[in-house]
Amino acid sequence: MSGRSGQQLRVRYFAGAAAAAGVPEENLELPAGSDVAYLRKTLAARHPRLEPVLEVASLLVDAVAVSDDSHCLDDATQVDVLPPFAGG
């Protein structure tokens, strides 16, 4: 863990995630050493309607898909929340 007290992270929501969050994006300050699991819990606490979306959403951390909830976000600047999209 670094000596930083926290970091700014831009979170962008798309499609149903934006509707559930009620905002298209927001900036969060996370404590140093935060991981994807912590981010999911934080977002669900801020936006309760977003919780079921987060359970199935893909997350892009600085444009790279991340599926490991233990992925550390210390160097991240942006996370995109992408719910499953239906095609047809």
Image: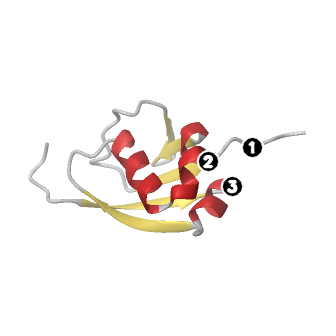
> Residue 46's spot in the image, x, y percent?
44, 62
Q: Amino acid at mark 2?
A: Leu
Along the line of sight, the residue nearer the viewer: 52 or 86:
52
Q: Say which label, 3 or 1, has the lower sequence index.
A: 3
Q: Amino acid at mark 1?
A: Phe
Q: Amino acid at mark 3?
A: Gly
User: At 62% from the left edge and 59% from the top edge, which residue is drawn?
Assistant: 20
Q: Is residue 13 above or below residue 66?
A: below
Q: CA distance from mark 3 to mark 1?
A: 9 Å
Asked whether, in this view, residue 29 is left or right of residue 61, the answer is left
Q: Residues within 10 Å of mark 3 (few under 14, many from 20)?
A: some
Numbered label tally: 3
Q: Say which label, 2 or 3, has the lower sequence index.
A: 3
Q: Which residue is mark 3?
A: 16
Name of the residue lying farthest toward the left = 3
SS for callout 3: helix
Along the line of sight, the residue nearer the viewer: 7 or 17:
17
Residues at discs 2 and 1 in contact (Cβ within 8 Å): yes
Q: Nearer the viewer, mark 3 or mark 1?
A: 3
User: At 45% from the left edge and 49% from the top edge, which residue is drawn?
Assistant: 62
Name of the residue lying farthest toward the top = 68
Mark number, residue 82? 2
Q: Residues within 10 Å of mark 2 (few under 14, many from 20)?
A: many
Q: Which residue is mark 1?
A: 85
The C terminus lies in quadrant: top right
SS for callout 1: loop
Name of the residue lying farthest toward the right = 88
Q: CA distance from mark 2 to mark 1?
A: 8 Å
The N terminus lies in quadrant: top left
User: At 12% from the left edge and 47% from the top edge, which residue is drawn?
Assistant: 2
Q: Nearer the viewer, mark 2 or mark 3?
A: 3
**Residue 30: quadrant of the picture:** bottom left
